[in-house]
Image (spheres, helix red, strand yellow):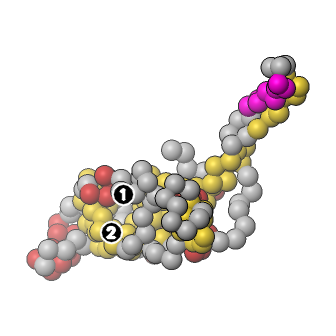
Amino acid sequence: MEISSSALTGALRVGVQVVVGRKRPVLEIYQQLHNTFDPPFEIDQKDSAGKTVRVDKHRFQNIFIDLTLINIGGDRAEGVTFEVSGEFRREEPRQELPELFGATIGQVAPGQTLYLMRIDSHDLNIYAPEKPGDTTAFKAVGIKKDTLEITMHYDGPDTILNKLLRWPRRWRGLRQYSSTFIFNPSIFIGDLPPPRYQ
C-alpha cells in the first residue's frame, strides 16, 4: 500500500524535531482519510432491441482510512508488540483485526513505516433493518461511537546502557517504552479531503 508524500513528509518533519530533542525510538500510528476515484469505464445503455442508445462513463469512488505505524524517533524500536482494546469492529467479512496485531515485530527503523489496516467508510456506520423485522436489507442510521485503542510496547536497541535503563520494567514483565493510539470514528464526520483520481 502506498503512503502519500504529504503523510511521509509530515512524519519526517515531526521525526526531525524528536531526534533533536532525544535519541530514542518513538512509535506513532498515523491515520489518513482517502478519497480516491478509480479509472473511468464505460457502460452501454441499450434499448429493448439491444441497440446501444448511449454510452455513459462512470468512476467508482473509494473512501477509506489507513492506519500506519511510523517510527518518528531517532533510534530503532525492537520487539514491538500490540495490545488492543475497545469495542470498535469493522463490518463483515473483515471484523477480525489483521494477524499482524498478534505478532512481534523484530524491529522498526527510524523513519520506517508499517501498514497496519484499512477501515472503509461503511465500517464507520451503524446499520438497522430497512423495515422492522427485515433481516435482508439494512440502512445506515448513524456513526459508531465505539473506539479502538491500540497500545504499542517496544524496547530500544539492545545496548549495555539500554539494558540497564530497561531492567526495572523488564523485571516487571514490561517493555521499555509504550505509546497509545485511539481510533474514534466520530472525528471523520464532515467534509472529505480533495479527491485523487487514478
Q: Position of residue 196 (x, y in %)?
A: 71, 48
Instruction: Using the image as rendered, state which of residue 34 and residue 26 is in the foreground.
Output: 34
Q: Residue furthest front?
A: 133
What residue range appears in magenta? 41-48
- Name which residue type carries label 2: Val
Instruction: Using the image as rendered, state which of residue 173 and residue 165 is in the foreground.
Output: 173
Task: State the residue position of label 2.
Answer: 84
Q: Position of residue 15 (x, y in %)?
A: 50, 65
Task: State the residue position of label 1.
Answer: 97
Residue 108 appears in view: no
SS category of the residue bearing label 1: loop
Q: Quadrant of residue 52?
A: top right
Asked if residue 173 lies left or right of residue 13, the reply is left
Query: What separation in Å lies between label 1 and label 2 (alpha carbons)?
Result: 9 Å
Asked if labels 2 and 1 touch by Cβ distance under 8 angstroms, the answer is: yes
Instruction: Using the image as rendered, state which of residue 123 and residue 183 is in the foreground.
Output: 123
| Residue name at image x 36 percent, y 57 percent | 97
Residue 75 appears in view: yes
